[in-house]
Amino acid sequence: MSDASAPAVDVEGLEKRFGQTVALAGVAFSIDRAELFGFIGPDGAGKTTLFRILTTLLVPDRGRARVLGRDVVGDLWTLRPRIGYMPGRFSLYPDLSVAENLRFFASVFGTTVERERAQIAPIYDQLAPFADRRAAALSGGMKQKLALCCALVHRPEILFLDEPTTGVDAVSRHEFWDLLGQFTRQGMTIVVSTPYMDEATRCGRVALIQRGALLAIDAPDRIAHSFDRPLFAIGADRVAAPGAYRYHALLALREHAHTHSVYPFGDTLHYADRRRDLPPDQITRELRAFLASRGFGDTSVSEIAPTVEDSFIARMGAPEGSA
Amino acid sequence: MTAAAHAPAIEAHDLTRRFGDFVAVDRLSFDIRSGEVFGFLGANGAGKTTAIRMLTGLLKPTGGRAMVAGHDVVRETERVKRDIGYMSQRFSLYEDLTVRENISLYGGIYDLTDAQIHDRAQTMLARLGLERAAGEFVRAIPLGWRQKLAFSVAMLHEPRVVFLDEPTSGVDPITRRQFWELIYEAAGRGTTILVTTHYMDEAEYCDRISIMVAGRIAALGTPAELKQQFGTSSIDDVFVRLARGAP
């Protein structure tokens, strides 16, 4: 298969252990060119191990991974210059200025900032006002943008970003995702990881990852809709202490005979009924009656569309370390 | 209920902090009642950290005043520190100590007697289902357990007010919900919880939230009220609109 027609990433049966710990337990997936693909899962799920294997920094115990048609173990030297990688921890030189960091990363890959100006323009223009500032003195959001710019400066065909938005404020995170969208529209493949479920919707497709295994791979809206029961939001907007009120309603609902699942979700509880085929308005009526009978008459009940996070919860079974 | 229980757990009146010409916190005023779960939000540099440092007695205000757990943050700094708990996702527990050693250490810091430490440790471990892990090093237990333990340790001395910094960052969605149940349970017992976070979906779990922009509170209300006020379906939208509108 020629490089150009090969998928951006193609992985089969990938396994990696560290001593007793299984970091990746047989992972398989494929990513197309110019996709914005997200790995969504908690800390310790295996995201970083996977990214380190795909960027040729770590050798798997078993299985095979090809990036841009090249084997990550056998073809590492020809593959490496074509990959950009932004690790989860801040990886730049804190004592160098913004401009110096950029020049350094460009020279490592045998190019110059001037030559790559067009490629990095959308992000470089945001950094230019801070060119002389030491990297250590940048805000969290600007540090992430500089790291992205350094990972882009050698014009890679594929970019791996490991938790680029962790610890970054909500405005900077929006700007960061907007930039990623721009780069994929220019034809770059971007693979990104995040522990935040709400960022799934910024990706074309996502893989849900938990304890070294993939729970699902699909477009985020399809994952959300794969939740296979009507879902209801129970709110308590008009009470004085809604959090504690909802918590006690939650405890009551756990004793309800028809509860399939119920859990806190933002300023509501999410409830799914055991009886899969009952009309939603009947469930709504019954829920209202049940809540009122237990002294929670100040709640509202409405049917809602499930989110990626609901689907993740339904798929993951028991959480990490539960008895 | 005593009179103290009716007083706000945190009250700030025109609380201000200047650094030279820069006004980091500009006349902050709000009341947080006992048992409330309050989300304290703001972009990087909005003044959130400065405000928290004043409310926890670590930094003197240059103007205004604040009472926390019934004590003045300037005149009764030591009593404030004693009556609050603090938990950050990044640092709270000593990884090279066992679960029980961590509990003893924090109990000692807060001057609990050995008998109090023993009793509260037993109650806490039973509540968290961690009895069998008591002798394990903290670094060896799952992240989700660590976070629940860190929260409970921050509550060991039964503080009236607890400050939580991004408490559920990075945990799986089920563990996260178990964590929020612990928070609501504590709030139901009258503990006041102040949560700072960059994650707006985490903010939606709070009873009320405030959003700081350029040193001031730009919005304050229940998540439902703020979403209605700004005509959006998420706190994320409210936040981005306010923060982008800042000069």
Image (spheres, coloured by chain):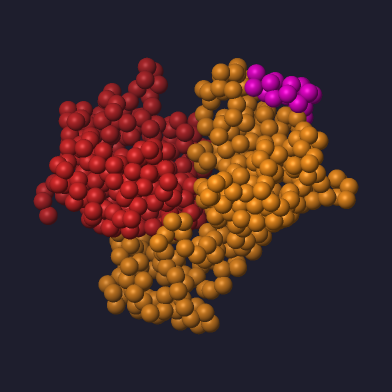
Chain colours: A orange, B red
Q: Residue furthest left?
A: B2
Residue drawn where x is 53% and y is 23% of the image: A136
Q: Magenta includes A112? A: yes
Q: Is residue B97 above or below residue B125?
A: above
User: Which quadrant would residue A86 be assigned to in this image?
Assistant: top right
- x and y, in percent, of residue B56 in the image: 28, 34
Q: Magenta includes B6? A: no
Q: Which residues are magenta?
A: A100-118
- x and y, in percent, of residue A227 in the image: 56, 68
Q: Is residue A154 above or below residue A313?
A: above
Q: Residue A9: in sight, yes or no?
A: no
In the image: residue A316, left or right of residue B42: right
- x and y, in percent, of residue B78 in the image: 19, 31
In the image: residue B228, left or right of residue B64: right
Q: How many marks?
A: 0
Residue drawn where x is 66% and y is 48% of the image: A61
Residue drawn where x is 69% and y is 48% of the image: A36
- x and y, in percent, of residue B217 in the image: 38, 38
The quarter of the picture where the C terminus of chain A appears is bottom left
Q: Residue furthest right?
A: A2
Closer to us: A28 or A286: A28
Closer to us: A295 or A49: A49
